[in-house]
Structure formats: C-alpha cells, structure tokens
Amino acid sequence: MYDETFLNQFRPNVGVALFNEQGRVFLGRRAKMASSVRSGENAAGEWRWQMPQGGIDTDEHVVDAAYRELKEETGVSSARLLSVTPGWLWYRFPEGYRKRDWIGQRQKWAAMLFEGDESEIDLEADDHQEFDDWRWGELEEAPSLIVPFKRHVYEELMAAFTPLRDFIRTL
C-alpha cells in the first residue's frame, strides 16, 4: 500500500488513552507549544490538551513505548493494557512546522485502564515535563481540545475506543 520511502517520512509514535474506572480519559495540558502551532484565535491555548504520546525508539515494541511514554509524561505505572489500534493513524505537520526531517507522524494508540491511586500521577516524573496540568475528561471532548492538525486522529481513536470505554462503565 505504501512504500518504505513514504513510511520513513512519518515519525513512528505511540499514544495512550488512559481510562479511569468511570470510563473517563486522562487529558494533559501541554506545558509548552511551538509558536507555529498557535494561531491568533488560539492565543489562550485552548488546543493545548492532549493524551500522552511520544516517539517509538528504534527496535522498541509499541506496547513497551506506550508504557514508557505513560510513565515519563504522567508518572503512572499502575495501568493495564486493554487494546492497541490495529493499524497506523496518520497526520501531517502543518506547513512551517518541522520536527527533524519528518513530515508528520504515524501512530499506534494503546487503551489502558488506570489501576492506581491518583496520588501516583506526577507530571514532573521525568526531567522533560510534557504537561503542566491534567484532568479526567470524556473521550468525546478530546478531538475539540487537540490542535486541528491532529484532530482527525483523535476522532478515529475515539471511534475505536468508545465501545471499550462503554464496557469499562459497566464494570
């Protein structure tokens, strides 16, 4: 479907939809954003909210990367893997926004159930702080909180994980 040259232009990345026992999802407010992502209408930073995500290291398994990113960005290690999206979800960076030589990211998303106490959440767990605030939110609100160029990926993962979220709410 896609040749290797095309695939290699997109940074391999993993995201985590961390659900609590009520079926709400972890949302973190980005500590900083590149000015090229902001627009005049976004000066207040309403698009700073997202779920944990980050690059997959060379020869790292997707699930290992998901647990590593979750720990680095939230301090959480008390989570159980529930599902991983079967294919890659893609987005291109907007014009003028560069991350090394990548033109975008291809992502696998992991759904996890938080099994710890909220006191475990530590946004300063790593020396590279990704978030400066967090909250539990509804999965359906996530696409409207993310920067527009990532929005379609959040809509796809929302559709993929809504049945799982609904199941969590029956437990």
Image: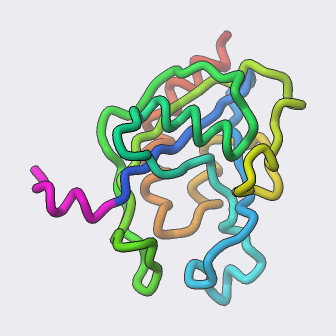
The mark total stands at 0
Q: Position of residue 157 (x, y in %)?
A: 46, 42
**Residue shown at 44% from the left, 53% from the top:** 153
**Residue shown at 66% from the left, 67% from the top:** 47
In the drawing, does residue 80 fall left or right of residue 3?
right
In the drawing, does residue 143 fall left or right of residue 45?
left
In the drawing, does residue 120 fall left or right of residue 13?
right
Q: Nearer the viewer, residue 95 or 64?
A: 64
Residue at the extreme right: 119
Q: Position of residue 81 (x, y in %)?
A: 54, 22
Q: Position of residue 35 (x, y in %)?
A: 63, 83
Residue 113: image quadrant is top right
**In the rendered image, the vertical position of residue 23 relative to residue 10, given as above or below:** above
98 in the magenta segment: no
Residue at the extreme top: 171
Q: Nearer the viewer, residue 61 or 47?
A: 61
Query: Which quarter of the image is occupied by the C terminus?
Result: top right
6 in the magenta segment: yes
Residue 101: image quadrant is bottom left
Residue 144: image quadrant is bottom right
**Residue shown at 78% from the left, 43% from the top:** 125
Question: Over which residues does the magenta segment extend?
Answer: 1-10
**In the rendered image, the vertical position of residue 74 relative to residue 166, given as above or below:** below
Please say which color scheme the image uses. Answer: rainbow
**Residue shown at 42% from the left, 30% from the top:** 84
